[in-house]
Amino acid sequence: MIKFVEKPLFSIMKPKFIIINGPNLNLLGTREPEIYGNKTFEDFLPEIREKFSHCDIEYYQTNHEGSIIDKLHEVGFSYQGIVLNAGAYTHYSYAIADALKAIKTPCIEIHISDIYARENFRSQSVTGTNCISIVSGKGLEGYKIALQELLDYLKI
């Protein structure tokens, strides 16, 4: 008789994560470098993929609210985790907040700058209420922190 030992799916396949960047984050490296730094996200992404080489890391950037929602719907039932920087939509997009509430994939919200130390309107996160955590003010390194938090949360 042959006995099969069930292995967790993660031991067979790399866990799949997506980083979703919202409006104006395509301008990293040139937009307000005193706040956001001089490095583009495309220059930083290889560092993330190297650190988390045991994971499949997808990247998506859009300046459009509906595109963020569409992407959340697309990946929100099949990926293991989402790292979301919704940019200014963080502060007022109930549509993105509802999309996060509707999906099953855990999400961590990330902000390069400290949203709690900037203009008053930035201190509220509408979207973060439907995330498992918010990482704010850690610069680009915050993306690595968020991914590690997801791995810890998922016990991967």
Image (cartoon, helix red, strand yellow):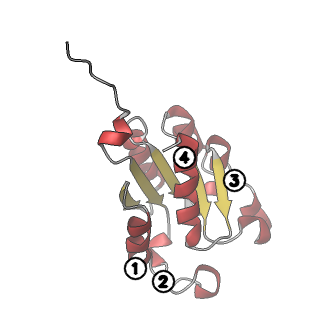
Dot 3 or dot 4, earlier in sequence: 4
The residue sitting at the top extreme is: 1
Is disc 2 in contact with disc 1, using a CB cutoff of under 8 Å? yes
Residue 43 marker: 1
Q: Amino acid at mark 2?
A: Lys
**Visible residue check, residue 50:** yes
SS for tag 2? Answer: loop
Q: Which residue is tagged 2? A: 39
Q: Which residue is tagged 4? A: 107
Dot 3 or dot 1, earlier in sequence: 1
SS for tag 4? Answer: strand
The residue sitting at the front extreme is: 1
Dot 4 or dot 2, earlier in sequence: 2
Nearer the observer: mark 3 or 4; the answer is 4
Residue found 72% across the figure and 63% down from its top? 122
Between 147 and 31, which is closer to the camera in this rendering?
147
Disc 1 residue crowd, few under 14, some 14–19, many 20+, Cα 10 Å? few
Q: Which residue is tagged 3? A: 125
